[in-house]
Image (cartoon, rainbow, N blue to C red):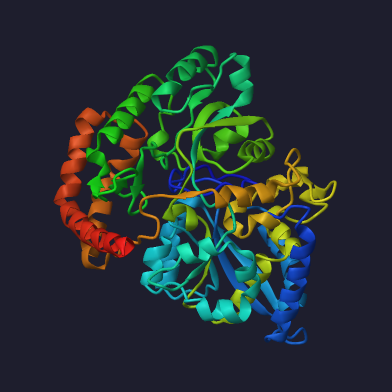
């Protein structure tokens, strides 16, 4: 999935984190009622303990994304607003995509002063860190301070993100199903008179990539970075870990994806593309694709989509983007948990943190300030609920999907007025993936998982990006991860999955 700039709401899935690489709201008809809800929630929050005459509480918020130049300036404006609403100020610390997992692990283990933190299926693993005690359970906090969230959020998000029966995070109200697409720089597509009709599989890209390589030597035909994973029709038990179940396997057999014919074919094709010069030579070590996307010197990449995504991407990049599906739209654990805010178990201000999250997810003024910056500086309002970026937006370019309820955010030029109603219809039509609701408990095999993670690191990105020959390196990868204990993990996963399947059958 591709996670990039402001108004980039598409999130989540495994290609950035999956990144990507993955990837990244209220309509004019609903804004009035949302605004009233926000006012009522704010009043309720003040009644529950906020005191405008008391010294405001400072909330430390850690979130993911490329650190932005104006983040302190915007948080000062946010704090001026939240002081009057809930008696709290906000300090945001942004941690870059590739550093987030490690730094959050260190901060959590050290007992650092954190109140709110971003988490997801693919970033600072939500399920595993909830089980480790990194997050405060929030069911009681939601009842007392989060009524706006529970009234607003589609119940499927909170129900689907429970861990062992409890909630530990607030999912962003965004697209519920996940669908992988090929994205294309339309300018290069049109220059070469190319069509994306019939493009779906990885192999179907080849004629287009070949043409662009020949006619546009300064353009990267297929933009890939270290977070890239080719799409195959499997549901992963753990993100970026080789255990999965095929999407149509009603027997729920756990397999090593490295041993599947679909993955071997994908890796072989990627290596072919690498040798042909379609993929960046540094793909296996490239942290993200954002620099190349800013220049427009790329033709195709892989991303996760949502309704009207092409317009979001086009607005964000400043040039037209078109896309076409490479997978069906299904609801995965990773999409339900694709973007969440949790309250740190170390927080000294858990109630106030929930008051802030409630306001963030119900108040359009706060939500758009956090997302788009200061009105008149970073963006301007146009007609109704529409906005346009101003030049200063380059100093505050946030990943919208990671910051809460996207259905409160302003509309981009070209968005339909009923955009968020269309989102709700898209969510309602989503079909569950095969492992939706199953959360693997790694407790009994935690040592083996750590060993396999270490063993696979040397192989994962080079294989996925096509940098190395799978004929040579795939057998080595399989041998190394098996020696590290993958068979034991598979057996434990199968036992848990069989038990879960039995409960579903009742």
- The percent position of residue 500, horizontal first and vertical second, equals 29, 62
Residue at the outermost right position: 383
- 369 to the left or right of 4: right
User: How many dots with numbers?
Assistant: 0
Viewer-closest of 468 and 259: 259
Residue at image position (53%, 81%) is 140
Q: Is residue 120 visible?
A: yes
Judge from the rendering whether residue 344 lies leftward or rightward of residue 472; answer left or right: right
Q: Residue at x 61, y 58 (%)?
A: 403
Give the residue drawn at x 56%, y 37%. 291
Q: Residue extending furthest front?
A: 506
Say above or below: 438 vs 471: below
- The answer to whether residue 462 is left or right of residue 46 is left
Residue 116 percent coordinates (x, y)? 55, 69
Q: Quadrant of the C terminus?
A: bottom left
Q: Height in image: 39 above or below 214?
A: below
Query: Residue 219's image quarter?
Result: top right
What is the x, y in percent for residue 86? 71, 78
Against 378, residue 343 (above or below) is below
> Is 354 placed left or right of 46 in the picture?
left
- Residue 80 seen in render: no
Residue at (33% x, 43% y) in the render: 248
Q: Position of residue 502 (x, y in %)?
A: 27, 62
Q: Residue 391 or 198: which is nearer the viewer? A: 198
């Amino acid at each position: 999935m591709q996670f990039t700039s402001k108004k980039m709401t598409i999130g989540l899935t495994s290609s950035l984190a999956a990144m990507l690489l993955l990837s990244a709201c209220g309509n004019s008809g609903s804004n009035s009622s949302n605004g009233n809800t926000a006012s009522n929630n704010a009043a309720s929050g003040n009644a529950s303990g906020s005191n405008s005459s008391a010294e405001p509480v400072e909330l430390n918020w850690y979130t993911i994304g490329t650190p932005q130049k104006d983040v302190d300036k915007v948080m000062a404006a946010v704090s001026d607003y939240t002081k009057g609403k809930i008696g709290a100020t906000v300090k945001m610390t942004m941690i870059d995509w590739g550093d987030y997992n490690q730094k959050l692990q260190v901060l959590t283990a050290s007992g650092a002063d954190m109140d709110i933190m971003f988490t997801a299926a693919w970033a600072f693993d939500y399920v595993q860190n909830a089980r480790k005690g990194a997050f405060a359970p929030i069911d009681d906090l939601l009842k007392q301070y989060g009524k706006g969230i529970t009234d607003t959020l589609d119940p499927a998000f909170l129900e689907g993100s429970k861990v062992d029966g409890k909630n530990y995070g607030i999912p962003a109200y965004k697209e519920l199903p996940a669908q992988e697409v090929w994205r294309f720089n339309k300018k290069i597509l049109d220059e070469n008179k190319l069509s994306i009709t019939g493009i779906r599989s990885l192999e179907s890209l080849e004629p287009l990539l070949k043409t662009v390589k020949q006619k546009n030597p300064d353009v990267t035909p297929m933009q890939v970075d270290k977070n890239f994973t080719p799409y195959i029709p499997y549901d992963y038990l753990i993100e970026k870990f080789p255990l999965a179940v095929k999407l149509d396997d009603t027997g729920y057999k756990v397999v090593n994806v490295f041993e599947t014919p679909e993955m071997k074919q994908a890796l072989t094709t990627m290596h072919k593309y690498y040798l042909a010069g379609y993929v960046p030579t540094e793909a296996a070590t490239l942290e993200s694709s954002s620099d190349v996307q800013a220049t427009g010197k790329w033709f195709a990449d892989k991303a996760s989509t949502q309704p009207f995504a092409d317009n979001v991407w086009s607005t964000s990049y400043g040039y037209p983007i078109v896309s076409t599906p490479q997978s069906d739209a299904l609801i995965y654990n990773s999409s339900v948990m694709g973007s969440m805010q949790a309250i740190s178990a170390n927080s000294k201000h858990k109630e106030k943190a929930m008051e802030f999250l409630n306001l963030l997810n119900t108040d359009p003024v706060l939500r758009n300030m956090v997302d788009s910056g200061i009105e008149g500086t970073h963006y301007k309002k146009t007609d109704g609920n529409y906005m346009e970026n101003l030049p200063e937006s380059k100093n505050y370019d946030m990943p919208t999907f990671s910051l809460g309820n996207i259905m409160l955010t302003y509309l981009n030029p070209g968005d339909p007025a009923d955009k968020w109603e269309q989102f709700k219809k898209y969510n309602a039509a989503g079909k569950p993936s095969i492992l939706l609701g199953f959360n693997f408990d790694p407790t009994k095999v935690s040592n083996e998982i750590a060993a396999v993670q270490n063993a696979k690191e040397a192989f994962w990105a080079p294989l996925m990006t096509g940098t190395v020959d799978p004929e040579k390196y795939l057998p080595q990868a399989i041998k190394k991860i098996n020696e590290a204990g993958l068979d034991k993990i598979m057996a434990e996963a199968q036992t848990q999955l069989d038990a879960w399947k039995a409960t579903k059958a009742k």
